[in-house]
Image (cartoon, rainbow, N blue to C red):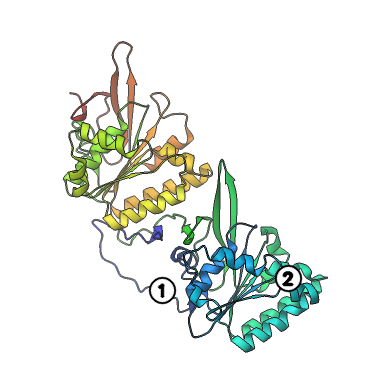
Amino acid sequence: MTTPITTLTPVVTNRRAHTRAPVVDTTERLTSGNPEADYILGGGFPANSINIIMGHPGSGKTIFAEQLIFENATDDRPILYFTTLSEPLAKVVRYLQGFQFFDEDKLGTQVVFEDVGGELAKSGPDALIPLLKQAITTLSPKVIVIDSFKAVHDLAQSVADRRRMVYEMTALLTAYGTTAFLLGEYTEEDILLYPEFAVADGIVEMSRRRLGNRDERYFRVYKLRGSRYLEGAHAFRITSAGLDIYPRLVSPRLPEGYEPASERISTGVTGLDAMLDGGVWRGTTTLLAGPSGAGKTTIGLQFALEGARQGEPSLYMNFQENPSQLMRTIRNLGADPDLAQAQGLDLVYASPVELQIDSIIVDMFRRIQQGRIRRLVIDALGDLASAATDPQRLHDYLYALVQHFAVSGITSILNFETIGNTVAGNGMQNAMSYLSDNVLLLAVDGDERTRRTVRVLKTRGSAHDRRVREVEISSAGLAVLE
């Protein structure tokens, strides 16, 4: 299981202590069986509520409901799972057995599956209420799942019949203190048309989109009464453990009395600290832009290695070079990879072929929490751009990411590969330029001899060197020449 990304505890420097009484949610909750989904839901589903889980076929509705029922199955009151006219019961149970959360010992006692499709096909939707009443009075289930409720809905002959059925069902479920989940192949337009959405306490959508050669799935809460849920689309994957959800990154709340750190730290690059008026401020973000071969990866590694030498845990997120190439580069810089990792350097490689920005962000924040990271390098932003579904989503992620770094006192370098020796003319580069505290431009030119240069385009709160400086890459790394 992953850790919710916005539970990151800020490591704030120079902050005055303030206390405020926390807001306590006294609503009794039913866990979804997934920590990330519970986080998005504000703690889980309210007990004794009626909830709709909607989505197209194959979006993950049934798996989500099955994970929920097995997590909540206990000896006190059983859980009832009605299958209607969507999939036969035998097929549902057969596929269920392939998931890690399935527990055969709970089947038939704590979790009861019942196929009511035959009775509904014979007697129509009017058969649902007597079936529910009999099950409630006989088993007294604490949770009832109806999969698919829309199939029952579609059997009704008129709008009046649908409304009457939904009203009677709501009254029955409410009177007996049962938490209900109605699954269905609904669309967003159906929310305004069908009566079950009016009485529902919670509405959760699970959607699937095609992106290139892969599908991306999203979890969204449309409505949850009495809850402060996390809005927006949250990516997820279906695995053998169930749903692996990546809560959307949002901007952190600025702590009361927060003040930026007044400490400079070294980049680990000879001559570069002097150009930056003594190094970079702690908690700032530096955009390092330049064409291929300009030295971006070398500077990023020197920055991370310097942090490890100074006792500052450093995270290097790499989408460019595979682990063996990166280890060779570190050795070429005269450093021992094993020693650097023992000192606190965390090297992470992810192939750019299967990148998904949500999973990358979650993994990054999990590592930040576990390792108390103080320095971070992302190499490179272009690969994150290819992992995002749209430019606005990428911009929102990067904005929130930079804000989290600032509040948490994490000093970061974000590498971006340019086409040519300029940052002008690219929307993402321009956006990152104003989000970053420092912008450094690397350039490569020369006809007979390759000449590399660095230029500080921007630093906040610093009297930086305005000249273009030549740099040299050797076995000791990159250095700014006098």
From the top left corner, tell me how far across and down residue 311 is, in percent. 17, 49
Left or right: residue 100 versus residue 198 is: left
Instruction: Work out whether 102 lies above or below 359.
Output: below
| Amino acid found under the numbered disc labelled 1 | Val
Dot 2 corresponds to which residue?
152
Q: Residue at x 55, y 65 (%)?
A: 96
Separation of residues labelled 2 and 1 (CA atoms) = 41 Å
| Amino acid found under the numbered disc labelled 2 | Val
Q: Which quarter of the figure is the N terminus placed in?
A: bottom left
Instruction: Determine crowd level at label 1: few under 14, some 14-19, many 20+ residues with C-alpha closer than 10 A.
Output: few
Q: Secondary structure at mark 1?
A: loop
Residue, far right: 157
Q: Tell me which corner region of the image, top left, top right, bottom left or bottom right, holds residue 198.
A: bottom right
Q: Secondary structure at mark 2?
A: helix
Left or right: residue 187 versus residue 379 is: right
Instruction: Work out whether 245 lies above or below 93.
Output: above
Give the mark nearer the N terminus: 2 vs 1.
Answer: 1
Dot 1 corresponds to which residue?
23
Residue 282 visible, this angle: yes
Q: Residue at x 69, y 79 (%)?
A: 169
Q: Nearer the viewer, residue 91 or 355?
A: 91
